[in-house]
Image (cartoon, rainbow, N blue to C red):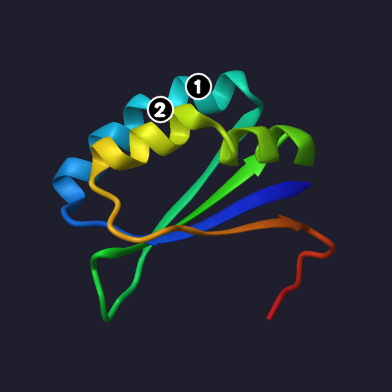
């Protein structure tokens, strides 16, 4: 499965989260299968997003879209995001 991993710094979670949630329908329409939100334990303004996608191509289209850039601006993203396109190769246990 392909995944999109994004890390960026936000200014205010209460401002950022509704914008992230409002963008869910656009992510889903482009092939997102949902994912996880993480927060840095030492810096609560640093957010990591891990989203599963139907195809790597759709994940790239999402990450490169002007709509996403505009949504991130509205959400108060402070830093240029680190973006990684990753593929699951194996699920490991303990």
Query: Along the horizontal axis of the image, is 44 left or right of 80?
Result: left
Rendered view: 45 above or below 70: below
Q: Position of residue 36 (x, y in %)?
A: 48, 51
**Which of the two residues, 59 or 72, is positioned nearer the viewer here?**
72
Q: Quadrant of residue 30?
A: top right
Q: Position of residue 54 (x, y in %)?
A: 74, 33
Residue 55 appearing in the image: no
SS for callout 2? loop
Residue 54 appearing in the image: yes
Q: Position of residue 83 (x, y in %)?
A: 57, 57
Judging by the rendered image, the residue that carries numbered circle 2 is: 23
**Which residue does the image show at 67% across and 39% down from the upper left?**
59
**Which residue does the image show at 72% across and 74% down from the upper left?**
93
Rendered view: 2 above or below 23: below
Q: Quadrant of residue 15?
A: top left
Judging by the rendered image, the residue that carries numbered circle 1 is: 26
Q: Residues within 10 Å of mark 1 (few under 14, many from 20)?
A: few
Query: Is there CB contact under 8 Å for labels 2 and 1?
Result: yes
SS for callout 1? helix
Rendered view: 50 above or below 26: below
């Amino acid at each position: 499965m392909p995944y999109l991993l994004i890390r960026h710094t936000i200014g205010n979670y209460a401002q950022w989260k509704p914008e992230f949630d409002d963008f869910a329908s656009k992510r889903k329409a482009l092939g997102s299968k949902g994912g996880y939100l993480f927060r840095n334990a030492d810096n609560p303004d640093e957010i990591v997003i891990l989203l599963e996608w139907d195809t790597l191509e759709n994940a790239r289209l999402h990450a490169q879209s002007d709509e996403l850039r505009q949504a991130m601006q509205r959400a108060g993203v402070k830093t240029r995001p680190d973006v990684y396109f990753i593929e699951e190769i194996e699920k490991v246990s303990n």
